Image: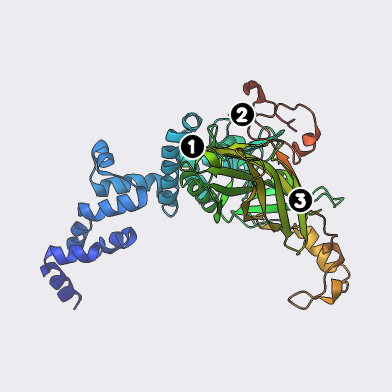
Amino acid sequence: MAADSELQLDLLPSDPLLHVLSYLSFRDLLRCSYVSKRLNELTKHNPLWKRHCCKHWLLTDADRSQRGLSWYGLFRHYYSDLGRYIQHYAALKKAWEQLKGFLQQRCPRMIVSLKDGATEQELDDVEAQIGCKLPDDYRCSFRIHNGQKLVIPGLMGSMSLSNHYRSEVLLDVETAAGGFQHRKGMRRSLPLTFCFHTGLSQYVALEDAEGRKTGESFYPCPDQTAQDPSAIDMFITGSSFLDWFTSYVANVVTGEYPIIKDQIFRYTHEKGCVATTGDITVSVSTSFLPELSSVHPPHFFFTYRIRIEMSRGASPKAACQLDSRYWKITTSDGNVEEVQGPGVVGEFPVMTPGKVHEYASCTTFSTPSEFMEGHYTFHRLANKEEVFQVAIPRFHMVCPPYREPESRTVRNLRSQPMTCLQGSCCPDGSAHSSSLVSEPQKASTSDSPPFDNDGQDDDDGGDDDRDRGRLGGLRGINTSALDGLRCPKFT
């Protein structure tokens, strides 16, 4: 019977068989090649493997011509080198190509800071050095580009506010290995990024440990209310390296993150966060600053960037000057505060047809989410008695998801329950723990001047020293090579 089936298969014309084979995955094609001599020949048909080369390795006709191989041979060549990463390679390669194409147009000096990909042996050596396996999506990305040189600005985004500056470098795998964490509270965590000015790093968890999940990326945030220095909260920035990196690239190449003075600033613009009053349009974008925030005590720091623009088609008689600002601030616990004052960041901008005025400011809250809205008061230059208001759209500020360390979670479960405030109970019917109740604090806002220092922090003193190196520096970084940079102390 089997012989009859094989005979019938051999008698079938090639075209319908190739059509059926075109729907198969590369693994099923290989399995079919072992069924019969006829299928073995058909499964090596070049157009079948062109599709898989394009899908999994993003290869083009030019790549095949350069290699001088058939599509089948080209697939085998790439699979022998990168086969373990086939689940991640296309998404990461595409993200890298999109990012480089964008940077070439907008931030060309970042391109030259990218390092060539690491080899399999180099990645294996790092695993042996730290005694821990690297996630496959992390390895795959570093096969494409092994991070960047230790330069400013960093590839993974910047932020500048008055005397505070942050720019995160994507660390190469060798330097990252020097900062691999063994100590309690950060065990099995590998740094992804590093900021020379603040000592801030994002980390990736290489194993399930201390409340972290394998592959998660996060900003560590020491619990300032705990006596135990290993009590570290975490702001989660990605569920995996693939999620973390591709999400960031998407925000860059779509213009979600603005480019300011050849640097990527991690502001996000909420859809619909635009208000037009007459000839003047106001739009707002926001950003969360983990290096100036804490979960315990609750202190969440945000910055917002406002763009005020007068239409080019406005009449010259519409020229006006900003006199004051008014804010209505609502926190997630329902508290409302109103703030008003003269000008913005100490300025009283004059708006004329086509003019754009931008500035950055900041605010802190004791709740992880809140929204602000308000208006500006202007007067016409031609008639100072003509005063009018321009709406500022409502915009939300929400910190990333955060997680407490296991030690605090255990303490909370063991602590004595107390009666819920004002007789209200938790959704699951349990009582609040006393360790989770804090006195609400008022929001505070502070105007900051626009980016007038090229992103560099010229203040060598001040209270920003408290933010430096909160978790210690990275070992293995040659700071002497960083001419002119003011770096945190390395421990």
Query: Where does the N terminus fall, quadrant-wise?
Result: bottom left
Relative horizontal placement of residue 354, taking residue 160 as reference (left or right): left
Residue 454: numbered disc: 2
Which amino acid type is shown beneath numbered disc 1? Ala
Task: Please state which amino acid type lies under the numbered disc 3.
Answer: Val
Picture coordinates of residue 136, whole percent (x, y):
51, 50
Dot label at residue 339 = 3
Q: Earlier in the sequence, mark 3 or mark 1?
A: 1
Which disc, if any, is residue 86? none
Q: Nearer the viewer, mark 3 or mark 1?
A: 3
Task: Specify the amino acid type for callout 2.
Answer: Asp
Instruction: Count up the numbered dots.
Output: 3
Q: Nearer the viewer, mark 3 or mark 2?
A: 3
Q: Going 26% across and 41% down the picture, which residue do you hit? A: 64
Res. 460 in view: yes
Neighbour class for label 2 at 10 Å: few (<14), some, many (≥20)?
few
Give the mark nearest the N terminus, 2 or 1. Answer: 1
- Cα distance, mark 2 to mark 1? 33 Å
Distance, label 3 to label 2, CA atoms, is 30 Å
How far from the left and from the top, in percent, is residue 43? 23, 58
Q: Position of residue 475 (x, y in %)?
A: 68, 33
Towards the viewer: 301 or 176: 301
Question: Do labels 2 and 1 touch, CB within 8 Å?
Answer: no
Q: Quadrant of the C terminus?
A: top right
Whether tag 3 and tag 2 are in contact, CB under 8 A, the answer is no
Residue 118 is labelled as 1
Q: Secondary structure at mark 3?
A: strand
